[in-house]
Image (cartoon, rainbow, N blue to C red):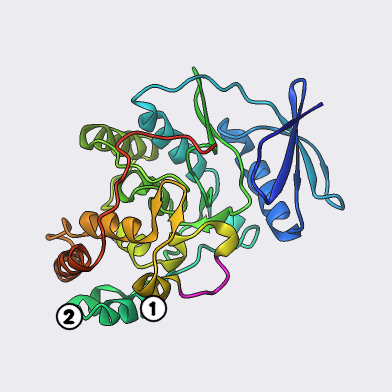
Amino acid sequence: MQRLKSGERSRVWVDGNRIIKQVVGDQAAFEREVTALRLAEHTGVVPRVLDVDHEKRTVVLERLRSDPFGEDWVIAYARGLARLHMATGPEHAGLLPRQVVPDPVPFLRFVRALEVEIGGAEAELVFEDSGKFDLLHGDPCPGNDMYSPQGARFVDFEGAALGDGLTEVVYLRIGFPTCATVSETPGELREAAEQAYFEERGFTAGLEDACVRWFVNGDALVQRSERDGTDHLARAVDEDWFWYSTTARGRLMFRARVVATFTETHPEMSALARRLLDRMGHIWEPQPIETRRTHVS
């Protein structure tokens, strides 16, 4: 049995055609993962659960095939997310936690701390529970996805929840907000991926509101283990810090640039994002954002 690289929250081994994963110290995260995997098993986009030891927080999984991915991996990624999101419905209420609704108050404090006028944007920052029951991965990042001729499949469901799948397909627009690596998907590929997502789901919808939700979310500036109630937007006013591929301020500036384009759907928020971007560009050092997918070592 061979030990594989994994994050601080888990230990992972490979044993022939099986993967053995032990979640470290977080029973709730372990139960989330097992529940999500079982709910999604019929979709073909997750590994099959072969055995579970709840007391030891250990699950035995099918070992998935993992091929090199091409430049157009985002299309398979989006189709896979669509299939995952369709795995659940209202009949599964209560089996997983609800998706967290962002609180705009820390973001508004952040805007004021940078001495930027809020204008009418506050009226566009009223968020409510979506009322949807899509099966959300919780962290659909590079490294948690695998590719084969059958398409994309996903692992690491410790943050799974029920909510609105649009908040995950927008990872391609808003730069993978919960991920160590931030990258900007080329426009044509992103549009093709979003089209593939909606074709799979059989409807279309605007994605701007989901992007705004990530823009105002301070927890999307740090890795999961640091999402402990700290106001990270307030931290970013006085300090900057690296999280693997770029800094917290780099993430904020990229997201502001994205939201600044939403002039038709969120005119006040778009104008605020432009003011913020101008202010941040004057007082902060610009940080580079990858234009191609990178790997976490």
- The residue wearing badge 2 is 117
The quadrant of the picture occupied by the C terminus is: top right
Label 2 crowding class (10 Å Cα cut-off): few <14, some 14-19, many 20+?
Answer: some
Which SS type dominates the magenta stretch? loop
**Residue 161, numbered circle:** none
Where residue 90 appears, as percent x and y from the top left, is 54, 57
The quadrant of the picture occupied by the N terminus is: top right
The answer to whether one can see residue 208 in this image is no
Residue at 21% over, 37% down: 187
Q: Is residue 242 above or below residue 74?
A: below
* Secondary structure category for the residue under label 2: loop
Q: Is residue 43 above or below residue 259?
A: above
Label 1 crowding class (10 Å Cα cut-off): few <14, some 14-19, many 20+?
Answer: some
* Left or right of 136, for residue 287: left
> In this view of the protein, which residue sits in the foreground, 201 or 219?
219
* Secondary structure category for the residue under label 1: helix
* Left or right of 12, for residue 175: left
Residue at 35% over, 64% down: 213
Rendered image quadrant of residue 235: bottom left
* Left or right of 8, for residue 44: left
Rendered image quadrant of residue 270: bottom left
Where residue 272 appears, as percent x and y from the top left, is 18, 70
* Left or right of 239, for residue 1: right
Region rendered in magenta: 227-231
The stretch drawn in magenta includes residue 229: yes
Where residue 123 appears, as percent x and y from the top left, is 24, 78
Q: Are marks 1 and 2 in contact (CB under 8 Å)?
A: no
> In this view of the protein, which residue sits in the foreground, 150 or 8?
8
N-terminal of the two: label 1 or label 2?
1
Amino acid residing under circle 2 = Glu
**Residue 106, numbered circle:** 1
Disc 1 to disc 2, how far (Cα)? 15 Å
